[in-house]
Amino acid sequence: MRKRQIRFILALTGLAVFVWFLGEFCIIGPLINDRKISIAWGLICLVTCCIYSVRRCPREPVYDVEDEAKKAAKKDGTSSP
């Protein structure tokens, strides 16, 4: 993993914990005080964080082996089969 991927994951995790904490202790705890809603809130935060992480995390470029062979052949001046 690259540094920017690790920074993205750490920042996203920190934001998710902050949102969970804010919702749990400021809204759900004093006003509703129901265990099922508290668990649902935690699951919503977790699933949202995972979905966002999979969709928006910076990815490393994927190289194709055939493309690499063609580039090497072109550079050497030979033809690839």
Image (cartoon, helix red, strand yellow):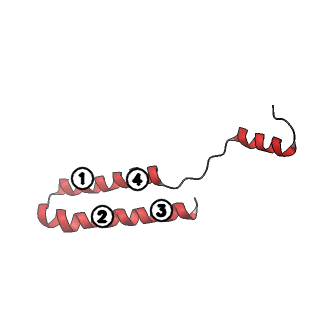
- Residue at the (25%, 56%) spot, across then down: 41
Q: Which residue is more in the foreground, 12 or 81?
A: 81
Element under disc 2: helix
Q: Which comes before the other along the chain, label 2 or label 4?
A: 2
Crowdedness of circle 1 by 10 Å Cα count: few (<14), some, many (20+)?
A: few
Q: Which comes before the other along the chain, label 1 or label 4?
A: 1
Amino acid on which disc 4 is placed: Tyr
Crowdedness of circle 4 by 10 Å Cα count: few (<14), some, many (20+)?
A: few
Residue at the spot of label 2: 19
- Mark 3 near mark 1, Cβ–Cβ under 8 Å? no
Q: Which comes before the other along the chain, label 2 or label 1?
A: 2
Q: Position of residue 8 (x, y in %)?
A: 48, 62
Q: Which residue is more in the foreground, 53 or 43?
A: 53
Q: Position of residue 15 (x, y in %)?
A: 36, 65
Q: Position of residue 37 (x, y in %)?
A: 19, 54
Gap between marks 3 and 1 measured at Cα: 25 Å
Gap between marks 2 and 3 measured at Cα: 16 Å
- Residue at the (34%, 52%) spot, across then down: 48
Element under disc 4: helix
In the image, which is nearer the foreground, mark 3 or mark 1?
A: 3
In the image, which is nearer the foreground, mark 1 or mark 4?
A: 4
Amino acid on which disc 3 is placed: Phe
In the image, which is nearer the foreground, mark 2 or mark 1?
A: 2
Amino acid on which disc 1 is placed: Ala
Q: Which comes before the other along the chain, label 3 or label 1?
A: 3
